[in-house]
Image: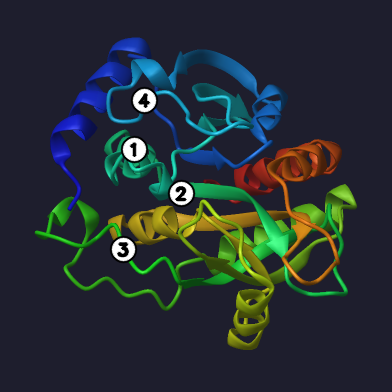
Amino acid sequence: MINRKPLEASLAAVKKAFPKAKPKLGMILGSGLSEIAEAFEQLGVLPYAKIPGVGAAGVAGHAGRLVWGKSAGIETFIFQGRRHYYEGVGWEAVATPLFLLKSLGAKAVFLTNAAGGTNPKWKPGDLMIIEDHINMMGVTPLLGTHDPFWGPRFPDQSFIYDQQLRAALARAGKQSKVALRRGVYFAGTGPTYETPAEVRAWRKLGADAVGMSTVPEAMLANAAGLRVAGLSCITNMAAGILNQALTHQEVFETSQKAMANMKKLILQFWKELGRAGL
C-alpha cells in the first residue's frame, strides 16, 4: 500500500521550490541517461534528497535530481534517475514522481530505461519503443487499500502505452534519423541480473527487453489517468545471448554511447508533441 503522507510532503516541497511550475509532461530517466536533461532549457533544479518521498538516489548512474525544464514550449519535469522497488524503500519513492505530475496538472509521462536485449538480432545501443510490458515482479504498487487518486480499484491495462504518443515517437525517429525498434519490456524485481534459463523462458513469453523498473511507474501512471510512452536503451545483451558476464558498468557505458541519439530523438519527440498541442 502506498502511504500518501510522504507523497503529500513531497508535493509541498516541490511547490515551495518551484512555486510557478505547471508541467505538462514528465520524463523519468533510467540508468546512465541523466545527461539527457542537459538538452532542455533548465528553469530550476531540486536534489532528490530534498524531496521527502523520494530521497537520495541509491544506484550509480542516477543523478538523483528533479529538473524543471522546457523544450519546444512544453514545460517538463525531468526526473534524473529513479528509485527502484529492489532498493527496499517502499513504493512511495517509486510513486512520488507520478503523484507530483498528476497533482501539478501534467497530462503524460515519458519513461526511459536501460535494458538487456533478448533478441539476438539486436545490438547494444539500439533504442526500443515500448509497445507493452510483462510484469514478472510478483507484486504491484496498487496492492492494499484502494486510493481513488490512483484511479479505479481495477484499472484497465489494455492500452498502457498510448498509441498516439508511440506514433509521435516513431515520427520523431524518422525526422531525427534515429533507428527505432519496437517491442515488449519484461520487468523482474532485481537487483540480480537474469539467468540464461530465465532469458530463454522470457523470450518464449514474448520479451524483447528485460529490466528492473518502468513497469510499476507505467501501471501507476496509467491507473491515475496519465498518458504513457516508454523507451528502452538496449545497453547489453541479456544473459546467455553472448558468452560473457553482465555488469552495471557495461550498462552505464553503453548508455553514454547512445546519448547523442537519445538527445536527438527526445528533442524531436518534444517538437512532435508541441505540434500535437500537448
Q: Mark 1 or mark 3, which is nearer the start of the sequence?
A: 1
The kind of residue on which mark 3 rests is Thr
The kind of residue on which mark 1 rests is Ala
Tag 1 residue: 93
Tag 4 residue: 55
> In this rendering, would 20 be left or right of 272?
left
Tag 2 residue: 108
Residue 20 in sight from this viewpoint? no
- Residue drawn where x is 34% and y is 56% of the image: 220
Looking at the rendering, which quadrant does residue 255 occupy?
A: top right
Residue 276 in sight from this viewpoint? yes
Q: In the rendering, at what x and y percent does residue 268 appear?
A: 75, 43
Q: Mark 4 or mark 2, which is nearer the start of the sequence?
A: 4
C-alpha gap between disc 2 and disc 3? 21 Å
Check contact, mark 1 vs mark 4: CB within 8 A.
Answer: yes
Q: Mark 3 or mark 2, which is nearer the start of the sequence?
A: 2
Numbered mark located on residue 140 in the image: 3
Looking at the rendering, which quadrant does residue 41 occupy?
A: top right
> In this rendering, would 189 be left or right of 200?
left
